[in-house]
Image (cartoon, grey):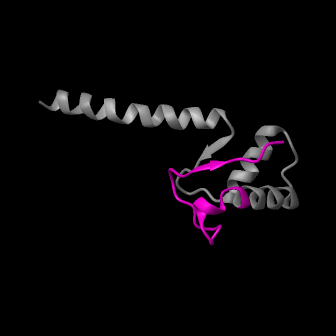
């Protein structure tokens, strides 16, 4: 039945969502479509109430990249939706 299929699909996707939500609470960011490291850094600084100047954004996105280089690869401009990036503390 269609209802059984939907229920089955929902039960298999929910743990993934919970795992992602859990990682966000511990200093991570899940990449969304259209995001870049620059946009993520600007968002983080804004949420922290810090000045999001060009140099502070640049410093933070480079830190995010270095922390996640193994996941991202050699091109910091190529991140993919769903990737979970670790964020620098402090």
For the point 53% across and 38% down, the residue is 20
For the point 54% across and 52% down, the residue is 83
Q: Is residue 19 left or right of residue 14?
A: right
Q: In this view, does 70 lie to the left or right of 58?
A: left
Q: Which image quarter holds the N terminus?
A: top left
Name the residue at the bottom extreme.
Answer: 74
Q: In this view, does 42 lie to the left or right of 36?
A: right
Q: Is residue 86 left or right of residue 20?
A: right
Q: Position of residue 62 (x, y in %)?
A: 76, 62
Which corner quadrant of the image does residue 49 belong to? top right
Q: Where is residue 24 in the image (x, y as percent from the top left)?
A: 62, 37
Q: Which image quarter holds the C terminus?
A: top right
For the point 75% across and 58% down, the residue is 61
Q: Main secondary structure of the magenta part?
A: loop
Which corner quadrant of the image does residue 46 belong to? top right
Q: Position of residue 73 (x, y in %)?
A: 60, 67
Over which residues does the magenta segment extend? 66-90
Viewer-closest of 59 and 35:
59
Q: How many marks?
A: 0
Instruction: Please say if 55 is above or below 15.
Output: below
Q: Does the magenta stretch include residue 31?
A: no
Q: Where is residue 82 in the image (x, y as percent from the top left)?
A: 50, 50
């Amino acid at each position: 039945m269609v209802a059984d299929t939907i229920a089955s699909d929902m039960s298999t996707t929910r743990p993934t969502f919970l795992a992602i939500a859990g990682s966000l609470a511990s200093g991570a960011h899940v990449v969304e479509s259209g995001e870049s490291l620059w946009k993520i850094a600007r968002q983080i600084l804004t949420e922290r109430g810090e000045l999001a100047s060009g140099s502070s954004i640049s410093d933070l996105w480079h830190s995010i990249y270095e922390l996640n280089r193994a996941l991202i690869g050699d091109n910091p401009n190529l991140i993919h939706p769903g990737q979970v990036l670790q964020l620098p503390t402090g």
